[in-house]
Amino acid sequence: MEVYSYSREINRNKVVFCEFDIDRVRTIFTRIFDSYDLKIKDEVFDSFCEDFYNLVREIPASNERIWRMIITDMFFSYDEKGWLYAAVTNNSFKRKQFAILANVILGELRV
């Protein structure tokens, strides 16, 4: 039986982002927020996109699982500040909703 190694699992799920700029990030998030039952307040939309753009540029992580956690945490942070219009109030449902959106975002940013 193979010995389980979490570090090998992390290194196995690499994600490589395509080339993008802040305008492409805005376009991606506009399309995603229009398609899903989660909205961000208009007055913080640009800030949200800039925060995400800066995260992707500054964090050297290449693991898909880590990025899903980072994006999910970013949604929770904005939700706690009252900047999201979430359809659900239960945190376990929010986590699932945010995780789905994180997968969609990663799909949009892949090479």
Image: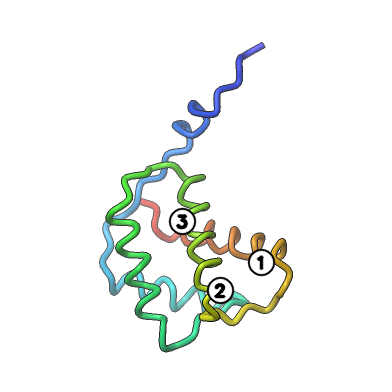
Q: Is 105 in front, or is 82?
A: 82
Upstream in the sequence, badge 1 or badge 3? Answer: 1
Element type where label 2 sits in the image: helix
Q: Is 17 in front, or is 77?
A: 77
Q: Residue at x 37, y 72 (%)?
A: 49
Which of label 2 and label 3 is nearer to you? 2
- From the image, tell me which residue sits under label 1: 94
Which of label 1 and label 3 is nearer to you? 1
Cβ–Cβ under 8 Å for marks 2 and 3: no
Crowd band around label 3 with a 10 angstrom C-alpha radius: few (<14), some (14–19), many (20+): some
- The percent position of residue 22, horizontal first and vertical second, equals 28, 71
Q: Mark 1 is on which residue type?
A: Lys
Real-space CA distance between mark 1 and mark 2, rounded to the nearest whole angstrom: 10 Å
- The percent position of residue 78, horizontal first and vertical second, equals 50, 72
Residue 2 in view (yes/no): yes
Q: Is 82 in front, or is 26?
A: 82
Upstream in the sequence, badge 1 or badge 2? Answer: 2
- The percent position of residue 89, horizontal first and vertical second, equals 71, 74
Name the quadrant containing residue 19.
bottom left
Q: Which mark is residue 106?
A: 3
- The percent position of residue 50, horizontal first and vertical second, equals 32, 71
Crowd band around label 1 with a 10 angstrom C-alpha radius: few (<14), some (14–19), many (20+): some
Crowd band around label 2 with a 10 angstrom C-alpha radius: few (<14), some (14–19), many (20+): some
- From the image, tell me which residue sits under label 2: 79
Q: Mark 2 is on which residue type?
A: Asp
Q: Residue at x 55, y 66 (%)?
A: 76
Upstream in the sequence, badge 2 or badge 3? Answer: 2
